[in-house]
Amino acid sequence: MIPSILLDIGLGFVSHALAACSRETLQNATAAYVQAQTAGNPGLLDLASNVSYAENDTPLDIKQGVLSQPITIDFSRSLHDTVQCATFTELTAATSKHPYVIHTRMLLDNSDTTTPNNTNNNNHSSSQITHIESVVTDAGDWAFNATGHLYWTRRETWDAIAASARDARATIQAAADAYLDEWANTSVAVPLGTPCARLEGGIYSGTRDPAANTCAMPAFPTPLHVGNRRYVIDEELGAVDVFDGFPWIERTEPDRSMPSSNLIRVEKGKIRYIHELTVCATPNCGR
Ligand SMILES: *[C@@H]1O[C@H](CO)[C@@H](O)[C@H](O)[C@H]1NC(C)=O
Ligand SMILES: *[C@@H]1O[C@H](CO)[C@@H](O)[C@H](O)[C@H]1NC(C)=O
Ligand SMILES: *[C@@H]1O[C@H](CO)[C@@H](O)[C@H](O)[C@H]1NC(C)=O
Ligand SMILES: *[C@@H]1O[C@H](CO)[C@@H](O)[C@H](O)[C@H]1NC(C)=O
Ligand SMILES: *[C@@H]1O[C@H](CO)[C@@H](O)[C@H](O)[C@H]1NC(C)=O
Ligand SMILES: *[C@@H]1O[C@H](CO)[C@@H](O)[C@H](O)[C@H]1NC(C)=O
């Protein structure tokens, strides 16, 4: 039996976890994340004492993870989801000794009061990070080329969208869902814009004509059900990231859903950019 005092604390935590977070809180968290990964020091983050950490769908001791290795980060983009109290960051590390492209999703609690074990040892309003998970790609993962990723991501425009032109959260999420749902059902209409370009690992669909819509997917030989979707949505950037499982792609294990992430920018309801990372078990998923 659980003592009622603990139940009260538990319920308090739940109501905090459901509350919205400020954009500034989340921006501080993503700035700290980029610093922590640069230094290879997770201690620079305000972590809950029982923070969960996972890479490529596998729970891991944060001290054994990539976050505990210093990485030279050439470029990053972050999304801030004030409704879910969640963040997303894409790190492009092309000039690092070990090149990586990493997608990271973090969930924060919304403790807007002093937290007793704040690892930063300060007392300003703080929200601690309760979950961190990453899709970590490097050599051998799907179409991996950090140099190519860096080259193309730097040329894209992901400015804040004017308040009057912003899409609703539901519209942004629906565009991403349609893109993934079409892999299972080719009748699904995907709102691709013109132009639209996809950065798949380090390969850019818009290489030949960046002004064209080059995002349409060729039909897969079999319907693919992309499941376990976890979203971070930022209306200000018109962007969503979806962590998901990509079946079929790994030739040696076609039934396994490989860890994958799609970062999608939507403008006026239409998809403008897609950045896909997918982890392989064998070099380039055996393809
Ligand atoms: C964000 O970081 C700035 C600079 O360190 C700090 O002044 C501010 O209080 C922080 N805001 C929140 C909400 O934590
Ligand atoms: C961390 O602790 C909080 C508060 O006790 C609890 O609600 C939450 O489920 C725990 N999280 C994990 C990942 O164990
Ligand atoms: C805070 O840290 C102290 C000392 O390490 C520990 O005994 C206590 O359980 C922690 N409290 C919480 C809420 O995590
Ligand atoms: C933060 O606030 C707590 C509770 O008021 C206090 O005990 C602690 O000394 C403060 N810590 C710092 C670093 O100011
Ligand atoms: C990676 O991308 C860069 C820039 O587009 C290109 O020059 C290079 O040839 C690519 N490397 C491989 C192995 O495809
Ligand atoms: C496939 O998508 C179409 C268009 O959205 C829909 O009408 C149809 O019911 C879907 N089929 C299945 C099997 O879900």
Image (cartoon, rainbow, N blue to C red):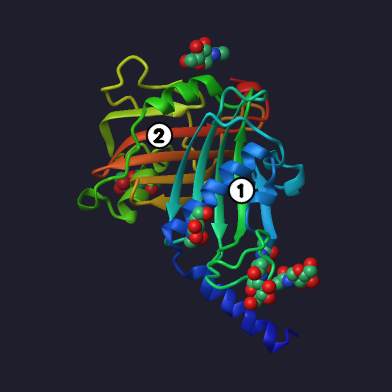
181 in relation to 117, above or below: above
Looking at the picture, tell me which residue is in the foreground, 49 or 268: 49
Instruction: Tell me which residue sits at (59%, 74%) in the image.
Output: 13
Q: Which of the 4 quarters of the picture holds residue 194?
A: top left
The disc placed on residue 274 is 2
207 in relation to 2, above or below: above
SS type, badge 2: strand
Q: Residue 224 in the image: x percent, y percent?
A: 49, 38
Q: Please, which residue is most extreme toward the bottom here?
A: 4
Relative horizontal placement of residue 16, taking residue 187 as reference (left or right): right
Q: Residue 257 in the image: x percent, y percent?
A: 59, 40
Ligand 4 shown in quarter: bottom right
Looking at the picture, tell me which residue is in the foreground, 203 or 166: 166
Q: Which of the 4 quarters of the picture holds residue 259?
A: top right
SS type, badge 1: strand
Name the residue beneath numbered marker 1: 133
Instruction: Tell me which residue sits at (27%, 51%) in the image.
Output: 167
Relative horizontal placement of residue 220, taking residue 101 as reference (left or right): left
**Res. 143 visible in picture:** no
Relative horizontal placement of residue 263, taking residue 247 as reference (left or right): left
Mark 1–mark 2 distance (CA, rounded to whole Å): 20 Å
Query: Reading the chain from its start, which is encountered first: label 1 or label 2?
Result: 1
Looking at the picture, tell me which residue is in the foreground, 277 or 86: 86
Q: Residue 241 in the image: x percent, y percent?
A: 45, 45
Amino acid type, callout 2: Ile
Asked if the residue under mark 2 is in contact with the one under mark 1, i.e. CB atoms within 8 Å, the reply is no
Relative horizontal placement of residue 112, taking residue 167 as reference (left or right): right
Instruction: Tell me which residue sits at (58%, 46%) in the image.
Output: 33
Q: Residues within 10 Å of mark 2 (few under 14, many from 20)?
A: many
